[in-house]
Image (cartoon, helix red, strand yellow):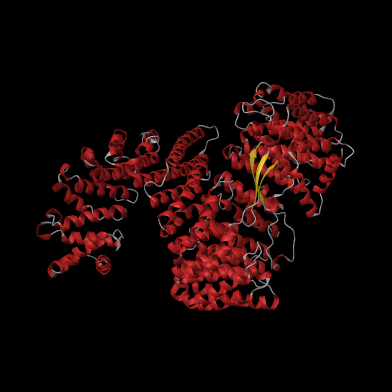
């Protein structure tokens, strides 16, 4: 008894506001054995003499214990003890008088049930099922609530008996949803029904069987909203997200209900926004289904009405701090919804509906409507991109008028629309409207009386210049610089006199953006800005000027990068000292100090400017950089109950793992961490062996980041940086010697392989696969252990199988009743993603074949059936292209052994030479070339058979068109390789004149080197066919060489460039011959010949 009393005190202390008491109590609680904890906690829950908050705490702790440590605690208890716990829980539910405690005990029962379903789906607690049936039929409302609460919490409670009890479950839910006398039972039953639907979202037959429950759920959504409860509405949002097709039979009723609730100003903002969220979510998860209800979709402009819900604020335009958007406000919610619904349903549906509403709003005398109309134009740009592009001229003319609107918030919204369109429609927007937009923004930036508008005009200018082609911006540089310089000087005075800084912060970034785009053209303006910028960094040391200081540091480094080392070197030493001083004076920067990320990026730019000279600064730079890159995010596995106490506003993001479980991550500091990781990649890339001292520590930091947690934009950036760093770190490590290099590879190879198997994001996955392939090429033969080969083979096989499976699923979607042309666009995007992963599978195989040669063919045979499947005639052309590319590599790197697979690929390769798709022809032609060069005698007959088809492709009328030229050049190269390496199988004297007439190759640089190399062989051997009688072909050869240099097919680093230069020098000896050859060349070609002589 004394122990139990001590435990009650401990429970009280666990809730203490005193951190020390609470921490000490947590340590004491953690030290209690699991079995004892359960006994103490159960006793506390059942003891009515104890304060309710202590009993509630005990219930929460018991649920958490079963959720997080079930396997460690429960199975070790005696059977009698386990039975006693089950009985005690059901007894507690039956007799508990406090609704809050009963609810929490129900959560414990649900958690225990979840853990007592075995691997075969048997519920090892059959008594709980009997309890459910008895309770749901009880006259006691509390017991009926308890049964529904348990079922809501764990809808899989019936395990493998679910099918057997399906009708009973349905009757139970219907009966409770019709309980008019007890609204709380109706609501709980609706939530339980929704939970059951969500738990079975993949079972189409079950969803159909339960579809007649949906009207009851919708009625409950309506009723509960007017009783101040939005829990059923939240369940409807979840259904729209996870099981949207369940709503199909009652989609019209669902949409009408949500539109009506959204429009009802008597409801709370949250309820109205949740109603809108149902529609918006459906536009993302079931767009095609929604597009069929165009009459209802036409009512969507209700979002615009929400966007007008703005407050009058006389101080708004004078604010010097940019407060975060009020994400709870209807205006922000409406704007976000409009953006998402435009992306979901597409511009074809949305733009015609919404355009007329926006135009009407823009003519409204009330500023709020004009503001909302302009913000709506900003919101729909991404989703309506294609349709808006055709009327962009009309839209821009309208928006620019509002830069001179009498109300500052409307002018602000106009700047917002311009900035957004500059991003959404770049570079078309810049090319078409540069004259009007730059003038309008510079004029708006003069608005000294409204700094918030001034700052936003500067922000829009940043958006405009970021994606503006350099040639368009240069003519405006004088005007831009004049305005920016004047505003900067005026705002520097304001900073000194009044302490205001908002506009100055934006103008500094505008200057940086202009310099970044103008590059070397900014040199004449460098001295106008640099002294003032350095002065800001030196003097703006107060805490409230941290952001200004950070942005100025960014500006200086971007200007330095733009103007180049020669101009910047005069200030480089002083700037480096300023940065070093910042690093040391502010060594204890707070976690949220904005200077940190600006400093990190600035150091990396300085590294790019200074190159190897930057190495001396690494000891100062790397400490803070590594600390930032090492930030460990706070993560937690939470159940639904715990999530309710943590808000996403606290910086947490969640991903639902199912079974009432969520994975949470606190995102504070992660953006800085991602930036730091990207900068480490920059140092490794720029400094190479100069970075070796840090390579090991960076590898230890980066390799764990390859592990997938869950989708988040910032986490993806970290993983991308980690993947990109792997081959760069190996390059750095090469100077450490073979043993050091091998150790580093051993550390990173297993995680790299595993991440290829587990990474779900296609962009990140492709980068990981690309990096892995580069690592294999760098490490060479023998770099993979047999177990790694086995694991990699299984993963690549899985990727290929997934590729075929995804194609089948897309075909199924094309036969779905909701299929339309917008669905087809989505499917094509998915297909492109899939094909891109297929190219990375090909990259990995290429790296393995090129480094391990014939030794890997036995390993490769596990993939062979799938690669052969890619070549089937009926498959999409991209499959056939990459199937051929893989066999091209097999031939190139694994001959003569490759011939044992010839029956699988020779027929498709020959047929593919005349394929209508140029990419397929190119892959086949390259294959013929490598067979001639590397395949040996086995492939002679095939090469001879391929020649007429190669010639046919080359001589086709449109063979040099943009889409065909690469395939044609591969055919020309292949003909050259057959003549060069298999001359006995072709009539060389007949083929060579044709081959010469097809030169030079201008597009495929790799194949151009092969052809010029062969041309050099033939010239150096005085081949009479190539040189012609009395060297009559030399002018033609000069023309070929000149065009090759002019098109950059020949580069000074290519071995053949010296040989070609020697050919030209030999001709120079004969004045007459030289004149004859040069006279046929135009000015560009003559310059190309001279460049070759000067550099080779």
Question: Which quadrant holds residue 182?
Answer: top right
Name the residue located 46 percent from the left edge and 52 percent from the top edge: 743
Q: Where does the image place residue 174, in percent across and percent down from the top left?
A: 74, 26
Question: Which quadrant holds residue 864?
Answer: top left
Picture layout, residue 809 above or below residue 675: above
Figure disc tally: 0
Q: Where does the image place residue 46, in percent across and percent down from the top left?
A: 84, 35
Q: Where does the image place residue 560, in percent across and percent down from the top left?
A: 49, 71
Residue 460 can be seen in this image: no
| Left or right of residue 620, residue 665 in this image | right
Q: Nearer the viewer, residue 419 or 770?
A: 770
Which image quarter holds the N terminus?
top right
Q: Where does the image place residue 408, in percent across and percent down from the top left?
A: 67, 65
Q: Nearer the viewer, residue 1085 or 611?
A: 611
| Left or right of residue 791, residue 355 in this image | right
| Left or right of residue 825, residue 1089 in this image | left
Question: Which quadrant holds residue 786?
Answer: top left
Which image quarter holds the C terminus?
bottom left
Q: Residue furthest top?
A: 164
Residue 294 can be seen in this image: yes
| Left or right of residue 590, residue 865 in this image | left
Q: Residue furthest right?
A: 49
Name the residue located 54 percent from the left edge and 58 percent from the top edge: 677
Q: Residue furthest left?
A: 1030
Q: Nearer the viewer, residue 1047 or 303?
A: 1047
């Amino acid at each position: 008894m004394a122990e139990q009393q001590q435990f009650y005190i401990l429970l009280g202390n666990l809730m203490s506001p005193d951190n020390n008491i609470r921490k000490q109590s947590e340590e004491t609680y953690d030290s209690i054995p699991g079995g004892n904890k359960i006994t103490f906690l159960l006793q506390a829950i059942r003891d009515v003499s104890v304060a309710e908050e202590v009993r509630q705490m005990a219930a929460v702790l018991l649920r958490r214990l079963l959720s997080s440590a079930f396997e460690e605690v429960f199975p070790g208890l005696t059977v009698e003890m386990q039975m006693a716990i089950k009985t005690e829980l059901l007894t507690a539910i039956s007799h508990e008088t406090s609704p809050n405690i009963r609810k929490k005990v129900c959560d414990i029962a649900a958690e225990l049930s979840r853990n007592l379903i075995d691997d075969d789906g048997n519920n090892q607690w059959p008594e709980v099922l009997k309890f459910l049936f008895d309770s749901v039929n009880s006259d006691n409302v509390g017991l009926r609530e308890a049964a529904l609460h348990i079922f809501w919490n764990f809808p899989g409670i019936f395990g493998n008996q679910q099918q057997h009890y399906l009708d009973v479950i349905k009757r139970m839910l219907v009966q409770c949803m019709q309980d008019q006398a007890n609204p709380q039972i109706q609501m709980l039953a609706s939530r339980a029904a929704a939970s059951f639907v969500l738990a079975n979202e993949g079972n189409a037959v079950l969803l159909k069987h339960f579809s007649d429950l949906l009207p009851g759920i919708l009625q409950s959504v309506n009723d509960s909203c007017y009783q101040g409860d939005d829990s059923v509405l939240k369940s409807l949002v979840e259904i729209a997200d996870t099981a949207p097709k369940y709503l199909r039979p009652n989609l019209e009723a669902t949409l009408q209900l949500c539109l009506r609730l959204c429009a009802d100003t008597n409801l709370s903002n949250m309820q109205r926004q949740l109603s809108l969220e149902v529609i918006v979510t459906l536009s993302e998860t079931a767009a095609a289904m929604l597009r069929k209800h165009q009459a209802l979709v036409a009512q969507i402009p209700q979002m615009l009405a929400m966007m007008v819900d703005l407050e009058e604020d006389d101080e708004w335009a004078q604010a010097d701090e940019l407060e975060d958007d009020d994400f709870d406000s209807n205006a922000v919610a409406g704007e976000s919804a409009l953006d998402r619904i435009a992306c979901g349903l597409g511009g074809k549906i949305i733009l015609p509906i919404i355009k007329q509403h926006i135009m009407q709003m823009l003519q409204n005398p009330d500023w709020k409507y004009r503001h909302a109309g302009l913000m709506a134009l900003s919101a729909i740009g991404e989703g309506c991109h294609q349709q808006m592009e055709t009327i962009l001229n009309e839209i821009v003319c309208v928006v620019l008028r509002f830069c001179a609107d009498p109300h500052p918030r409307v002018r602000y919204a106009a700047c917002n629309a311009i900035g957004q369109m500059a991003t959404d429609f770049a570079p078309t927007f810049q090319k078409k409207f540069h004259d009007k937009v730059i003038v309008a923004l510079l004029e708006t930036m003069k608005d000294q009386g409204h700094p918030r508008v001034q700052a936003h005009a500067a922000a829009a200018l940043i958006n405009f210049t970021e994606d503006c082609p350099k040639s368009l911006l240069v003519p405006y540089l004088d005007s831009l610089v004049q305005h920016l310089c004047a505003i900067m000087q005026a705002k520097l005075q304001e900073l000194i006199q009044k302490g205001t800084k908002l506009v100055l912060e934006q103008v500094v970034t505008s200057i940086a953006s202009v310099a970044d785009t103008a590059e070397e053209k900014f040199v004449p303006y460098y001295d106008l800005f640099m002294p003032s910028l350095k002065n800001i960094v030196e003097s703006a040391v107060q805490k409230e000027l941290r952001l200004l200081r950070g942005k100025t540091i960014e500006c200086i480094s971007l200007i330095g990068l733009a103007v180049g080392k020669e101009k910047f070197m005069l200030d480089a030493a002083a700037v480096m000292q300023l940065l070093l001083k910042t690093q040391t004076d502010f060594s204890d920067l707070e976690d949220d100090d904005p200077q940190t990320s600006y400093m990190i990026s600035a150091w990396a730019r300085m590294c790019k400017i200074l190159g190897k000279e930057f190495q001396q600064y690494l000891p100062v730079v790397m400490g803070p950089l590594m600390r930032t890159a090492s930030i460990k995010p706070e993560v937690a596995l939470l159940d639904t109950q715990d999530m309710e106490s943590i808000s996403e506003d606290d910086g947490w993001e969640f991903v639902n793992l199912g079974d009432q479980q969520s994975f949470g991550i606190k995102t504070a500091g992660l953006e800085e961490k991602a930036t730091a990781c990207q900068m480490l990649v920059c140092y490794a890339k720029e400094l190479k062996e100069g970075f070796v001292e840090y390579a090991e520590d960076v590898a230890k930091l980066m390799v764990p980041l390859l592990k997938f947690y869950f989708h988040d934009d910032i986490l993806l950036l970290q993983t991308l940086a980690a993947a990109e760093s792997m081959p760069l770190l190996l390059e750095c490590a090469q100077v450490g010697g073979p043993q050091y290099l091998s150790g580093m590879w051993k550390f990173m190879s297993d995680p790299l392989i595993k991440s290829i198997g587990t990474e779900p994001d296609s962009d990140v996955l492709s980068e990981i696969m690309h990096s892995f392939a580069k690592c294999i090429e760098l490490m060479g033969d023998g770099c993979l252990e047999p177990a790694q080969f086995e694991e990699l083979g299984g993963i690549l096989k899985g990727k290929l199988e997934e590729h075929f499976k995804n194609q089948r699923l897309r075909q199924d979607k094309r036969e779905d009743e909701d299929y339309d042309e917008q669905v087809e666009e989505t499917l094509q995007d998915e297909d492109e993603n899939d094909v891109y992963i297929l190219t990375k599978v090909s990259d990995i195989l290429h790296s393995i074949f090129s480094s391990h040669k014939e030794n890997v063919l036995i390993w490769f045979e596990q993939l062979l059936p799938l690669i052969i499947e890619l070549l089937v005639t009926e498959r999409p052309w991209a499959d056939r292209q990459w199937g051929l590319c893989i066999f091209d590599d097999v031939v190139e790197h694994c001959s003569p052994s490759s011939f044992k697979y010839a029956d699988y690929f020779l027929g498709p390769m020959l047929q593919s030479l005349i394929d209508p798709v140029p990419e397929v022809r190119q892959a086949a032609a390259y294959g013929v070339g490598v067979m001639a060069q590397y395949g040996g005698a086995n492939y002679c007959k095939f090469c001879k058979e391929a020649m007429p088809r190669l010639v046919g492709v080359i001589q086709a009328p449109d063979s040099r068109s943009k889409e065909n030229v690469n395939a044609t050049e591969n055919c020309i190269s292949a003909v050259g390789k057959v003549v060069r390496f298999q001359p006995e199988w072709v009539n060389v004297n007949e083929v060579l004149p044709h081959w010469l007439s097809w030169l030079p190759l201008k597009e495929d640089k790799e194949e151009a080197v092969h052809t010029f190399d062969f041309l050099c062989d033939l010239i150096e051997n005085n081949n009479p066919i190539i040189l012609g009688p009395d060297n009559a072909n030399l002018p033609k050869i000069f023309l070929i060489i000149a065009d090759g240099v002019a098109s950059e097919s020949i580069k000074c680093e290519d071995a053949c460039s010296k040989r070609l230069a020697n050919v030209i020098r030999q001709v120079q000896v004969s004045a007459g011959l030289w004149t004859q050859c040069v006279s046929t060349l135009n000015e560009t070609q003559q310059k190309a010949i001279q460049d070759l002589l000067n550099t080779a």
